[in-house]
Amino acid sequence: MTASGTLKMICSLGRVGSLVLRVAQMTSSAVSMAVLFIDGDVDLHAAFSYEIAAMSFLLVWSSALVCLDVYSLKEHRNVQTPKLLRSIVIGDWLSFFLSLSAACSSAGVLILYTHDLHYWQTHTTPILYCEISTAVAFTVTGFVFVSASVTFITLASSD
Amino acid sequence: MTASGTLKMICSLGRVGSLVLRVAQMTSSAVSMAVLFIDGDVDLHAAFSYEIAAMSFLLVWSSALVCLDVYSLKEHRNVQTPKLLRSIVIGDWLSFFLSLSAACSSAGVLILYTHDLHYWQTHTTPILYCEISTAVAFTVTGFVFVSASVTFITLASSD
């Protein structure tokens, strides 16, 4: 079996792998936001506000898909209908581009602060929190990429 | 014929549409870099240096593909071999993610400058140049996305 076939078998919609991925997305996006809120200085930076908006969308989106996966696993129902898969592919790729752009813009601002403006010496703790949040946002992006690819492969092979 | 079929017929590797797209990518990435260099204050900002690096890569990549398209159109040779298409798909998607991340990080820094730090009043001209450069970088990302999608569709239907 090819790598994409194995990935599809384990992680496609309604399987345990998909549930694990969605739970990982949900918790990571919540952690990414929570770390920024600990700092308490979030509303100052538009880039981090955008990251919070993207992570909020991702939290809602992945929570809905966790519910769908749990329903499918509990009731032993096949939820892989082409119509549903098509909607999820669109939502997943939208989430992917949203979280990638948010993580990249936050990283750009962080590098400006630490590398160019040398805020690292005077604002060590807030910058550390922002760095953790951005790193987690990149991790979320990775998880969403895997989910989006698997759903796309499932849709392509079901059509 | 479907939309993807029409797009494939016009813009696939070795066609006039592909050449037009590659020339647009080449000139846009050159313009995006040139606008930043006019400012003369580029090396101060790591985010814009990353944009310059991404646009340089894109300039080299699209120039190589312009040569390939010109060769194919002039010599009436079919260059759509699976091996070549596979390499171009990888290169195109790499360019896409590279230019998207560069454009997003530049946009993050620019929003920080204009929205949060209110540099707009004191540094109107340099910020205007950076805004033009970032907007052009987003346009390049759009062009690369079209090229990458068409090459992917061509590869998928040729396998």
Image (spheres, coloured by chain):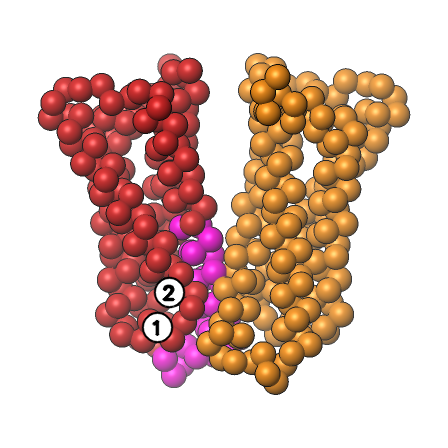
Chain colours: A orange, B red
The tag on residue B43 is 1
Relative height, residue A121 to residue B141 (above, below): below
Magenta highlight on residue B107: yes
Q: Few, some or many C-alpha atoms within 10 Å of disc 1 (few <14, some 14-19, many ≥20)?
A: few
Reply above or below: B85 against A120: above
Label 1's element?
helix
Query: In the picture, residue A144 is in which quadrant?
Result: top right
Task: State the residue in front, B147 or B54.
Answer: B54
Residue drawn at 88 percent across, 21 percent down: A75
Are the two marked residues, 2 and 1, in contact with CB atoms closer than 8 angstroms?
yes
Q: Which residue is mark 2?
A: B49
Element under disc 2: helix
Indicate the position of residue A8 as horizontal and vertical percent values. 65, 24
Q: Residue B87 at what x, y percent from top left?
A: 36, 31
Q: Amino acid at mark 1?
A: Asp
The image shows residue B31, relative to residue B21, as above or below, that is below
Instruction: Find the magenta span and give its range.
Output: B99-123
**Quarter containing the C terminus of chain B:** top left
The mark that comes first in sequence, 2 or 1, is: 1
Q: Quadrant of the N terminus of chain B?
A: top left
In-image side of A43 versus B71 (left or right)? right
Which residue is found at the position 22% from the left and 43% from the top?
A: B63
How packed mark 2 is, by other alpha carbons closer than 10 Å (few <14, some 14-19, many 20 or more), is some
* Closer to the camera in the image, B49 or A152: B49
Q: What chain does badge 2 belong to?
A: B
Q: Is residue B61 visible?
A: yes
Magenta stretch mostly in which secondary structure? helix
Question: Which kind of residue does numbered mark 2 sit on?
Answer: Ser
Give me the residue at 74% from left, 21% from top: A79
Quarter location, residue B90? top left
